[in-house]
Image: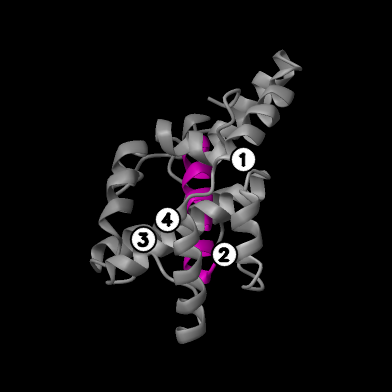
Amino acid sequence: MYRGGLTRGQIAKLVDAATSTVGYHLAAARNEDPELQSAHEAAAALRTTHASTAQGLEHIRELVAFVQDTGRYPSRASTSEAERTLAAWLQRRREEAREGTLAPAYRDGLAALPGWQTPTRVEADEARWRERLTALVEYRAAGSDWPRHKAFVEGLEHELGVWLHSQRSKLHRSELDEAKVRELDRVLPGWQIGRQRGRKPREG
């Protein structure tokens, strides 16, 4: 897929994996195949040439009008389906811009909105959540017990412990998004229970 011009983010969505995980495997693949990167860039250039559509250009006009009317960018958490659709479209353009595959027509049109490439607070929070989730999955995969959040714990364990405690607290208050609950259940079975009482921490 990477050889065919797809970005790291696009591949992650297709295979339902964390972007960081896909990036790790791509780095290994590039080390084994020095020509992979050039093949990807050539294919991406072709995809970019034909990427812009009449619907996409219409989304730019809608986006510009939305920002001018509301003074903010659309949110994927909005109750409006139209706004969520526009926010999802903008997110894909941001990803393409970071990967260097954004269609010139989109780049020129979006230039009317200074700072459009900067994620909103909601998107930044979502990215941080994903990073913490990936880090905890790797922490557990390394053989470590569930991290603790107590003050006497330091370093990575404390950082991940605080995050995990926050997810459990939000779940108990019914404030944790259902999609995130499903994701946690899928990649971290037992996360709601954690350490068993009286169980000694694993030795490093």
Residue marked by disc 1: 49
Asked if residue 153 is among those painted magenta in the image, a careful observer would answer no
Q: Residues within 10 Å of mark 3 (few under 14, many from 20)?
A: some
Q: Which callout, 1 or 2, points to the residue nearer the camera?
A: 1
Query: How far apart in space, not on screen, are marks 4 and 3 (Cα)?
Result: 12 Å
Mark 4 or mark 3, earlier in chain: 4
Stretch in magenta: 120-139
Q: SS for tag 3?
A: helix
Q: Amino acid at mark 4?
A: Gln
Q: Is 38 positioned to the left or the right of 157 in the image?
A: right
Residue marked by disc 2: 119
Q: SS for tag 2?
A: loop
- Residue at figure coordinates x 41%, y 34% from the top left: 14
Predominant secondary structure, magenta span: helix
Q: Which callout, 2 or 4, points to the residue nearer the camera?
A: 4
Mark 4 or mark 1, earlier in chain: 1
